[in-house]
Image: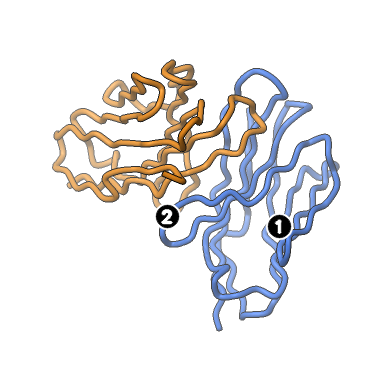
Chain colours: A orange, B blue
Amino acid sequence: GAGVSQSPRYKVAKRGQDVALRCDPISGHVSLFWYQQALGQGPEFLTYFQNEAQLDKSGLPSDRFFAERPEGSVSTLKIQRTQQEDSAVYLCASSLGQGNNQPQHFGDGTRLSIL
Amino acid sequence: AQKVTQAQTEISVVEKEDVTLDCVYETRDTTYYLFWYKQPPSGELVFLIRRNSFDEQNEISGRYSWNFQKSTSSFNFTITASQVVDSAVYFCALRGGRSGYSTLTFGKGTMLLVSP
């Protein structure tokens, strides 16, 4: 596709359930990022992939959060044993190269609500 | 450590007014990159502009202009003759370092409401 695609668009889960969020980056983009955006806040960095390698996971809030990009394209963010504080919009972004000057292109996000 | 401050939480204007969104940043890097993004109600963050720290030329793109002042660590964004379609949340962001990897740090955003 032309842009970054995320699915599902909305996800409602009960506390304690596991969820999986998918990101399909722009074709050919080497770098992939996940962000968490709380209501009324800016996006907060979670993790970064260069191709299939996860080079930075310093932003993941707990060991319940896990991300993978096994073939260097599609990525999945998994949250285990969800808590109410996990409710947020999860944004995926990709960029063509790996330089710090590269603009990141974002998807529409997945709005996660934990009941 | 990097920090981006957008002091204006919400701005309301009437169509055709000019509006300036403020952004102040902090970084220890001598080379860094500043970005502005627009987030309409649909949720997607739309890239608007990138500015390199070593290029202090101001830029104009249609009704949009950006004023980069290294001396005051500011990168302000002006919309001339605002339109209803400009209503969105605008984020300023910073990424440091010419080489090596660094994360993209966002401000909290400024919500712009343009009424007819």
Percent across and percent down for residue A25 are 43, 36
Mark sitting earlier along the chain (2/1): 2
Residue at x 83% of width, y 39% of height: B55
Percent across and percent down for residue A89 are 36, 46
Residue at x 44% of width, y 26% of height: A47
- Residue B43 got which mark? 2
Task: Respond whether the residues carrying marks 2 and 1 are from the same subunit.
Answer: yes
Q: Chain of mark 2?
A: B
Snapshot quadrant of residue A102: top right
Query: Relative to A65, is B41 on the left or the right?
Result: right
In the rendered image, the vertical position of residue B75 relative to residue B78, given as above or below:
above
- According to the image, label 1 marks what residue? B77
Quarter of the image that includes the N terminus of chain B: top right
Query: Relative to B13, is B65 on the left or the right?
Result: right
Residue at x 56% of width, y 29% of height: B103
Q: Secondary structure at mark 2?
A: loop
- C-alpha distance separating marks 2 and 1: 20 Å
Snapshot quadrant of residue B93: top right
- Residue A19 got which mark? none
Residue at x 70% of width, y 75% of height: B81
Q: Chain of mark 1?
A: B
Quarter of the image that includes the C terminus of chain B: bottom right
Task: Identify the amino acid type marked 1.
Answer: Phe
Q: Of A14 and A76, which appears nearest the observer?
A: A76
Percent across and percent down for residue B37 are 58, 50
User: Which-is-in-front pick, marks 2 and 1?
Assistant: 2
Contact, CB < 8 Å: mark 2 with mark 1?
no
